[in-house]
Image (cartoon, helix red, strand yellow):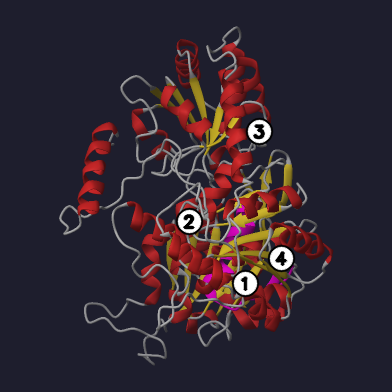
Amino acid sequence: MGKIRLTTAQALVKFLNQQYIHVDNHEFPFVEGIFTLFGHGNVLGIGQALEQDPGHLKVFQGKNEQGMAHAAIAFSKQHLRQKIYAVTTSVGPGAANLAAAAGTALANNIPVLFLPGDTFATRQPDPVLQQIEQEYSFSVTTNDALKPLSRYWDRITRPEQLMTALIRAFEVLTDPAKTGPVTICLSQDVEGEAFDYDSNFFKKRIHYLDRKAPSERELHGAAKLIKESKRPLFVIGGGAKYSQARDILIELSEKHKIPLVETQAGKATVESQFTNNLGGLGITGTLAANTAAKKADLIIGVGTRYTDFSTSSKSAFDFEHAKFLNINVNRMHAYKLDAFQVVADAKLTLEHLAPLLNGYETEYKDEIKALKAEWSRERERLGKITFKRDNFEPEIKNQFSQEILNEYADALNTELAQTTALIAVNNTIDSESIIITSAGSLPGDVQRIWNSSIPNTYNVEYGYSCMGYEISGALGVKLAEPDKEVYSLVGDGSFYMLHSELITALQYGQKINIVLFDNAGFGCINNLQMEHGGGSFATEFRTFDNKILNVDFAKVAEGYGAKTYRVNTVEQLKDALIDAKKQTVSTLIDIKVLPKTMTDGYESWWNVGVAEVSEKDSIHKAYEEKVQMRKIAKQY
């Protein structure tokens, strides 16, 4: 047994290079590379190690810690959690900036390795630059804020601790049942300390993603529930996508006439045009999916965690008569809604179930086709909504007065509806292109009306709905799919929040396309505010003298070096999309759209915190409506 003398940081980099994953008879490196933002807490440790010998790791210099972490998350999501990027930051603000991204990865069960620097293990120079001090413990640092946001968290205060910490870290990162963000904090003095490491620690290590098989009891119990049901419904979650269950879902759906509906994470597991795919479920769902859900007598959750948006705050289903069957590799999620639990891999479970369902057929007959056709007509209508100044007839929302709508039309010089623009994008770009979005009204719009004709072309983060993921994530998706066009659909609010990695994309020649929908406000929150009896308060973007803020986003991106376009009509939008595809540099299309022209709910309800006491009758009414809906919803 040999020894290799390395610094802690050098040992870390060497170990990362030797981690492989084995999935369905395919073996490949698990760690693709590392995003860096160097500071005094990591540049002399990890920075030195990467400069000396990065191995196969690709190294990208980020511009914002949250942004580059979101890029890493989107990369892993696009690779179905089978590859990761690591992210290194300095101590203090750099580490603190990881918090939003860590929450995003945790909520979405996406593996990512965070390597923030930390204060001195010796404590001799304390308090060092960027060190916080707590009177109750000298051991507390900024990195402790990442504990509740990490699936596994550790702090390295001696070089030899790295060995057990990293083995544990990769056990978590490669476990489909509990994967998520892993944080390994590296004391900055220890990063540079040397140790005689056992050479076996650096041998090639293969992590096997063996599919967990269902037990006979689980299979026969699930088959019994399905065969006893008349109107079952597949709810397709992210677990179905990561399990690559598309083919068996289509087979079972076609053979037994079982419709399927999608969560945000599950969308594009099965292509939108599949006959029995009724689209998004819940608050941001389609009329077809929500109608089917209310009438279903068995809900078959495949890899879903049943968020409030997917379940319409637990009002989407007929809890008095419907039963639940959950297939999930994670035991906690399988237990939700008092379901019969199958704690196993989604694809393998469905494949084993198939022969047990021979001869079974639902009672839907032509109803699935009718529901899909009805929604198709509604989508067509949403794609043709037009407005004319001084003659507005908003067909989706009408919370602003005619005068205010005219004011927006004049200020933004547009009469374009958001749904019309979005469907025009969907119909114009290539079908193999990948879209990415996260927050605001766009996730609801795309879940309802975006047709994904090719699987895994829909990378929408809605487990955390984190503003700032959209553009950063587009970089991550491009790194995962370098031969495909990637489109970041982002609102003006999210663009303000974080667009730093557009610069990184330009710097490294990673072409992304930003499609920016500017309605001069936090539109979806303004809708929420006004729908529940409030006025329009601090959610519009207005100047000190109450004028609508009109920002030239094209000029902003042009200053960074992107190819840009300004769009006010559908024709201009189509022309811009066609030209943007020809470009080799990143692009930004600045689309001015009118507020209140996004999609609205279809047979859904969201339980939000409405004021119980108010001076406004409209808020009293909204609260009473909430009370009535809570009587319908089943609370677990």
Give the number of marks: 4
Q: Residues within 10 Å of mark 1 (few under 14, many from 20)?
A: many
Viewer-nearest of discs 2 and 1? 2
Q: Which mark is residue 35?
A: 1
The outermost residue toward the top is 359
Q: Which residues are magenta?
A: 53-77
Gap in angstroms between the C-alphas marked 2 and 4? 28 Å
**Callout 3 environment at 10 Å: few (<14), some (14 to 19), or many (20+)?**
some
Residue at coordinates 45% horizontally, 78% vertically from top-left? 547
In magenta stretch: residue 57: yes
* 316, above or below 418, in the image: above
Residue contact between numbered discs 4 and 3, judged by CB atoms under 8 Å: no
Numbered badge on residue 246: 3
| Residue in the image at 39% along x and 92% along y | 125
Give the structural element (helix, strand or loop) at label 1.
strand
**Contact between labelled residues 1 and 4, with CB atoms less than 8 Å apart:** no
Question: According to the image, label 4 marks what residue?
Answer: 512
Question: Which of 464 and 179 lies nearest the eye of the viewer?
Answer: 464
Alpha-carbon span between mark 4 and mark 1: 18 Å
In front of the other: 379 or 363:
379
